[in-house]
Amino acid sequence: MSNDLILGAPYSKKDLVSVFKVPEIKGVQKGRYHLKGMGYDLLFVNLNKSSTAKNLHYNDFFEGEIFHWDSENREHMQTPGIERITRGDSVPLLFVRLNSRIKGITQPYIYCGKLEFLNHIPETSKPVHILFKSVDFDATTTNPKLKEIYSWRPGSGGNSPDPIIFNSKSRSTRTKPNKTERRGLITSRVGQGFYRDQIFEKWKKRCPVTRCDISEILIASHIVPWSKATDEERLDPDNGILLSPFVDALFDKHLISFQDDGSIIFSNKIDDKNLQIINLPLSTKIEVNEGMKKYLRKHREELKRKEVL
């Protein structure tokens, strides 16, 4: 039934009764409603909070494809409804509006698509602050309502980490986050805005392998993956290379790597036929500084390990 919903379209709760054939939706007052037997949770979000909600420091907002969401005031990570979402047993469907009422008229929600659980801020509870990936996020949308929702930011009354928005067309002016900020960035995984800026600067906004400089598609790739890196390594520019999508895919799967002198290495899992298709010269060489060598060594070790699997 979620396929009947249109991204960016307005929906009242009465409209959703028609979509899901569940009359109880019309009377829902809370911000989350579970559709039993359907595998969905409806999330209803008002961005501009009432005075009561502001006092409780609720912060819900988009940061690129990441959606920050605060649960109900009494909920925590062990609350059955929250566990259902974090386990993946129920898919959240997000409905957002800036204001609940304008000049006394109840406003519809805008459908913002499906969400996928990423993480939560460990020190938060009652409410718990959760980070979702917006599966249907449309960075190129021309829908004015979606654009307004995507660009909205909470006021000074909240307690969530300040948004870090990456702009690939401008040079970074950020300073390295302090210890407290870094903990929030690492936990939420949105510190990659800071990290990505540094990688773009370091590699002069160009893939060193293909020389591609289309910033919209370039990827700030970790040498030692995020999942295996320490907090410091995750934000260390020496642990990153700016790569074209195709090269990033090869590098991420440890099908290519680089020597300490920058020379490219190909995994023996790439046969001669695919080497020709890939069309990366054996003479390919990138610039490697001293700080990168410890990361590249680990990357090469993983390439060798996977060759014998």
Image (cartoon, rainbow, N blue to C red):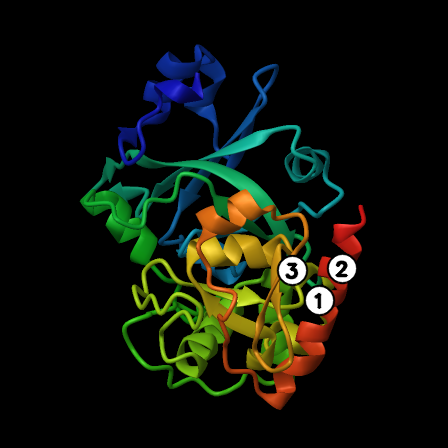
Q: Is residue 67 above or below residue 168?
A: above
Residue 81 falls left or right of residue 56: right
Can you give x and y, in whole percent of width and height, for residue 41 in the image? 54, 29
Query: Which SS class for mark 1?
Result: helix
> Depth check: 93 or 235 in front?
235
Q: Is residue 203 above or below residue 142?
A: below
Q: Which mark is residue 304?
A: 2
Q: Nearer the viewer, mark 3 or mark 1?
A: 1
Q: Residue at x 43, y 22 (%)?
A: 2
What is the count of numbered marks?
3
Q: Nearer the viewer, mark 3 or mark 2?
A: 2
Mark 3 highlights which residue?
A: 121
* Residue 128 visible in the current orientation: no
User: Badge 3, how many Cα within 10 Å: few under 14, some, many 20+?
Assistant: some
Q: Is residue 10 above or below residue 202?
A: above
Q: Residue at x 41, y 75 (%)?
A: 200
Q: Amino acid at mark 3?
A: Ile
Q: Which mark is residue 300?
A: 1
Q: Residue at x 40, y 56 (%)?
A: 64
Instruction: Tell me if label 2 and label 1 are in contact, CB under 8 Å.
Output: yes
Q: Amino acid at mark 1?
A: Arg
